[in-house]
Image (tube, rainbow, N blue to C red):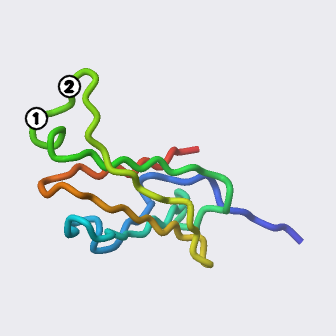
Amino acid sequence: MVNAVPAPGSPANTLCAGEGLLRCNAGEEGRFTVDVRDAFGNRAARGTYELRITLLGPKIAENGPRKGERDEAVVERDQRLDNGVWECRYTVTKSGPYILKVICPSG
């Protein structure tokens, strides 16, 4: 018997979903999910990739980054749902536009 396993994660086939990708209220938790898929659409195997997620705050979103300036919110991404999808959460305290970056390294 041959057991085929998923290929490494593919950024082009990775799916992100949830209200927290578009909006949230200051002081309340924003949520979204990330479903890492390989180049063939298979859900990537656990432990074969590491997501990097950054939420850049209003100062950087409006003016661009400046040397030494930090304006970020922490995105928790360590919880896995039973089906292998990452559940991500964040809370912001400042209103304004944010830039959300989800980086899925390719294999």
Q: Which circle marks residue 96 in the picture? A: none
Q: How many labels does the image show?
A: 2
Give the quarter of the figure containing the N terminus.
bottom right
Q: Do the residues labelled 2 and 1 touch (CB within 8 Å)?
A: yes
Q: Is mark 2 on a helix, strand or loop?
A: loop
Name the residue located 56 percent from the left edge and 67 percent from the top edge: 79
Q: Which residue lies furthest to the top in this view?
A: 67
Residue found at x 16% / y 46%: 58
Q: Where is residue 20 in the image (x, y as percent from the top left)?
A: 29, 68
CA gap between label 2 and label 1 equals 8 Å
Callout 1 amino acid: Asn
Q: Is residue 66 above or below residue 13?
A: above
- In the rendered structure, the answer to whether residue 107 lies left or right of residue 75 reads right
How packed mark 2 is, by other alpha carbons closer than 10 Å (few <14, some 14-19, many 20 or more), is few
The residue at the point 25 percent across, 66 percent down is 27
What residue lies at 27% left-to-right and 45% top-to-bottom? 56
**Foreground: 95 or 97?**
95
Whole-percent x, y for residue 100 in the image: 29, 52
Q: Quadrant of residue 38?
A: bottom right
Q: Which mark is residue 66?
A: 2
> Does 8 sit left or right of 70 as displayed?
right
Identity, as a three-letter code, of the amino acid under mark 2: Arg
Residue 89: quarter of image: bottom left
Q: Say which residue label 1 marks.
A: 63
Q: Nearer the viewer, residue 43 or 21?
A: 21
Which of the pair 60/22 is nearer the observer? 60
